[in-house]
Amino acid sequence: MEPIIKVENLTHIYSTGNVVAVKDVSLEINPGEILGVIGQNGSGKTTLVKHFIGLLKPTKGKVYVSGIDVSHQRVQQMAAKVGYVYQNPNHQLFARTVRDELAFGPKNIGLSDEEVEERVVQAVKFFNLEEFLELHPYRISFPLRKLVGMASIYTMRPDVFILDEPTTGQDNITTQTVYRLIHKLRDEGATVLCVAHDMILLAEVVDRMLVLRDSELIMDATPREVFSNYEVMSSTHLTPPQITTLSLRLKERYQLLDQTALSIDEMVGAVKNLSKQ
Amino acid sequence: MSEAKPIIEFKDVSFWYKSVDEAPALKNINLTIHEGDYVALLGLNGAGKTTLQLCLNGVIPNSIIGEFQGEVIVDGHDTFDTPVREMAKIVGMVFDNPEFQLSQMSVGEEIALGLESLGYGYEEMVQTIDEVLAIVGLQGLIDRSPFGLSGGQQQRLSIASALAMRPKILVMDEPTSNVDPIGKEEIFHVAYELNRERNMTVIMAEHEVEVMAQYANLVVVMHEGEIVVQGTPEEVFSDVELLDGLGLRMPQVAAFGYALEKQNLMKLDGHYPVKLNTAVETFGRLFK
C-alpha cells in the first residue's frame, strides 16, 4: 500500500529566531489509519502537521501527500485533500450562518448544488445541528461551534482529516459524538490525525501514536506501548487513562496481568481470564 | 470538617435569563457549602454550572438582569443587596479562557488592576503582588507580558489576580479546558494547595471526573438547571445508573467496579472506589 503521507528527514527552522521546531523527523502514514499526535505545547506537533496541509514548507527534507511533494503545492490545492479542524473554531469559521459555513467548502471545490445540499444534510444530521442552521456561528456556544468546525470540513470529504484537540471543552455527550465521527471517517476510508491530550481518545480510538518531545519524534508506536513506557510518559508529562494506570499498578504488584489494559472492557476481560485460570 | 460553618447558602434559587415563560437556567437550587469545602460542579454543557457560579459573586442578579427568585447568602452577605465590587473581595472568579480575562501590559499590572479598587498603597500593592505570584508559582515573571505566557501560566495569573483581593472563596469554571497537560497539573495543584494549606473554599466546574474525585469532598451534579444529586465523591459516583442516564462519565475505576459487580465477578455492594489508590487496594483482592 502506498502511504498517504510520507515524511523524509523533515527539519523545520522558523526564520524568526532560528528556532528548530521539528528536527529530522521521518514517518509514513497509511490510508485509513487513526493517529494520535502528542507532546507538550512547543514540542513541534503543530509545526509537523502544518506541513501536511502546505501551510509550512520544509527547511530540510521532504513531505509527500498521496505521492505529491507538498512544497510545490499551494494551500488551496491541498485543502481538498487534507482538512484541518482548528482547536479554536474562531480561527476557522467566517460565514454568516451555520448552513453557509457547511456549504462553503463543497461549493468551493465545484460540486453541484444537489451534491452540496446532500452533504450539508448529512453533516447536520450527524452532528445534530438542525436547530442552529440559520444562526450565525458566533451565536452558538463554543463547544457547538467546534462541532460546526468539524462538520464544515466533513462536507469537503478530504482524504486526510487533522483534528486539533477536538474534545477540549466538550462534555461527555459531545465527546462521544467526536469519537463516533472519527470511527465514521475511518469506515469511509479517510485517514485521521488527532493532535490531542484526551487520554481516553488516545487509548480507545487511536491505532498509533506519534510522541514528540523537544522537536523530535521520540516514539512511534501503539497506544499500549506508549502508555506502558514510563520514561516516555513521565518525560512528556502525560498521564495514561485512570484504568490504564490501575492496570499498570496491579501488574507491577501481582504479576498476573499479561497486558496493559486500555479500556474498562479490556480490564474486565483480564479479570475474566484470571477467574478461568 | 464537621465544625466548619456554612459559607454559601442557596435557598430555593431559580433564575431565568429572559422571562419566566422559558425553561429556567436554575431551578429550585438548595445548596449549602461549608468553609474549606472543595466542591466539584458536574454536568453537561448547558446544565447551569456557569449560571450557578455567577450567583456566587452577585453578577446574577445584579449585573445580569433576569428573573431571580430565592436567596443566595455568601459569607453572611445577601448577594441581592451587596454590590458586586464588595462581593469581589469575598469571591474570586477564574474562567475557562484566560485570554478573555487578561488585558494589561505586564503580569504585575494585571494583578494591580484589581488592587487599585481596594485603595491599596504602593508598598502594600507590591507586597501583595509578590505574595500571590509566589502562591501560583509565577515569581520572577512580574514584568513579562501576560500574552507571552503559556496557557497554564496565563491561567495561574488569572488565579493570582483573583487571590490578590484576598477572597475566601475561589470559583473556577473549567479552568483547564484550554491548557496542555503540564498546565492542567499546575492549575489543579494550585487549587488543591489553596484549599488544603489556606482553607480556601474552592468551587470548580470541570469535566475531568477522575481529578475531581481525587480532590473534591462535595460533588454536585446539575442537569437542566437543577441539582439532581449531591454528596461525597464515593456517594455520587456509586450511583452509576443515574449518571449514565444523565450522559455523564464517572471515574473509570468506579465504572470498572460497577462492571465487575454487574457481571458477578466481584462483590462490592454498590460501593465503588473512586480514587486510584483505593482502587488498587480494592481490586488487588482479586489477584491475591
Image (cartoon, grey):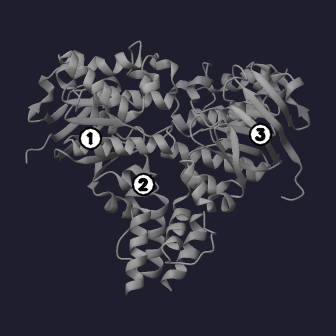
Answer left or right for B29 relative to A78: right
Residue toward you, B109 or A151: A151
Answer left or right for A217 relative to B174: left
Q: Three-letter amino acid code at disc 2?
A: Ser
Please tell me how crowded label 1 is: few (under 14), some (14-19), or many (20+) other residues with Cα within 10 Å: many
Please tell me how crowded label 3 is: few (under 14), some (14-19), or many (20+) other residues with Cα within 10 Å: many
Q: Position of residue A95 (x, y in %)?
A: 38, 14
Between marks 3 and 1 in the image, the one whose residue lies nearer the viewer? 3
Residue toward you, B230 or B34: B230
Q: Position of residue B22 (x, y in %)?
A: 67, 25
Residue located at (34% from left, 51% from top): A205
Discs 3, 1: same chain: no
- Return the residue at label 1: A185
Q: Residue furthest top?
A: A96
Q: Three-letter amino acid code at disc 1?
A: Leu
Image quadrant assignment for residue B61: top right
Residue toward you, B156 or A111: A111
- Return the residue at label 3: B29
Q: CA distance from mark 3 to mark 1?
A: 42 Å
Q: CA distance from mark 2 to mark 3?
A: 45 Å
Mark 3 belongs to which subunit? B
Residue located at (66% from left, 29% from top): B23
Q: CA distance from mark 2 to mark 1?
A: 32 Å
The answer to whether A92 is drawn above or below residue A230 in the figure is above
Give me the disc on residue A78.
none
Please tell me how crowded label 2 is: few (under 14), some (14-19), or many (20+) other residues with Cα within 10 Å: few
